[in-house]
Amino acid sequence: MRLDEFTKLAVSCRERLGVGFQGFRTDGKVMSLKWPDDVVEQFLYDHADNDGFLRDYGDVDLAAVAWDVEVIAVEDFLEMPTGPSDEGSIEEYAEDPDRWVKARNAGLHIGVKQCWQAHGTWKRWPILIDRALLTPGGSGLQVIEGRTRVGVLRGLHRRGDLVAGQHLAWVGRSIA
């Protein structure tokens, strides 16, 4: 299964009143992946029609990816890349972390500022992928979704602000 196989469904569910994410996640094809809802929402539902994501992750066999929550050291996030279509975006967010924290103050983002202040980490776990799934012989992790969060982390860390030494993240690795 490839990302582009979910494009029409994601757009349709987002556009149809009363369907939304609930309708998307309960689709048989989506359910067959057996992915956590948070990963389904942040990756497939939100980005299945994103041209950059389709270029960066369109060749990944989604059925061959298993997701789990992992503890990732702050040092790993300081140099972790994102996809080529968003190259430079993490550093852009890192330049002014306060701006991006302040922008997240409504709806599901309520509490973002307080999480950074109290715990030195994000409210919602970002989505990372093992680079071996992207290129043969690839190593390390790559940020799929959560570029702003990782940028804020880098910016706060550089400034010497409170940042936790370890952070939780969804990590996709090969099932095999």
Image: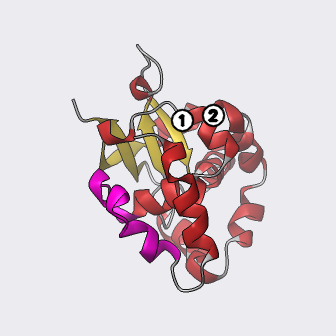
Q: Secondary structure at mark 1?
A: loop
Q: Is residue 79 left or right of residue 66?
A: right
Q: Residue at x 48, y 64 (%)?
A: 124
Residue named by callout 1? 58
Kind of residue sitting beneath label 1: Gly
User: Does the magenta portion include 5?
Assistant: no
Q: Are marks 2 and 1 in contact (CB under 8 Å)?
A: yes
Q: Residue at x 67, y 72 (%)?
A: 104
Q: Nearer the viewer, residue 157 or 33?
A: 33
Q: Quadrant of residue 161?
A: bottom right
Whether residue 9 is visible to the viewer of this picture, yes or no, is yes
Residue 55 tag number: 2
Quarter of the picture holding the N terminus: top left
Label 2 crowd (10 A; few <14 / some 14-19 / many >=20): some
Range shown magenta: 20-37
Left or right: residue 103 compared with residue 76 = right
Q: Is residue 23 magenta?
A: yes
Residue shown at 53% from the left, 36% from the top: 57
Residue at the limit of the structure toward the left, as seen here? 176
